[in-house]
Amino acid sequence: MNDDGVVGVPPGEPITSFALGRVTPNPSRYGQPVTIEYTLPRTASFRVSMVDVQGREVAVLASGMTPRGRYRATWNGDQMPAWLYFVRYRFPGGRPESSGSCSRVDHSQSQAPGALR
């Protein structure tokens, strides 16, 4: 992966469709950036953002003309409350909108005795 979040595509390896990869860690705790992996089958105007449960965009992770390839985007949602968030992908010619989910866990929430941390 380079500094732009490009993972790369081995020569000769076909990419035939948009693919949402892993969203990790999920759930995430404060101080843990979330990594979102995705694949674009061709160069396109593309946008990946985080939205809350009410559909409000809370962060834009990537936007603009993006070449074919595999990518990783990172979101540090430490400024956001613990809740469920969605990864929204938009690009022309593909599915109009695709999403994955990510939950943020407040590290200060108490856990039941004996619960794993």
Image (cartoon, grey):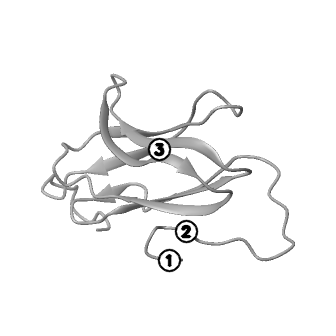
Q: Earlier in the sequence, mark 1 or mark 3?
A: 1
Q: Position of residue 2 (x, y in %)?
A: 50, 77
Residue, disc 2: 6
Q: Mark 2 and mark 1 in contact? Answer it, CB < 8 Å.
A: yes
Residue extending furthest toward the top = 54
Query: In the depicted view, which residue is nearer to us: 22 or 63?
Result: 63
Q: Quadrant of residue 113?
A: bottom left
Q: Quadrant of residue 30?
A: bottom left
Residue, disc 3: 48
Q: Amino acid at mark 2?
A: Val
Identify the disc placed on residue 33: none
- Dot 2: few (<14), some (14–19), or many (≥20) neighbours within 10 Å? some
Element on which disc 3 rests:
strand
Identify the disc placed on residue 2: 1
Q: Position of residue 1 (x, y in %)?
A: 54, 77
- Dot 3: few (<14), some (14–19), or many (≥20) neighbours within 10 Å? many
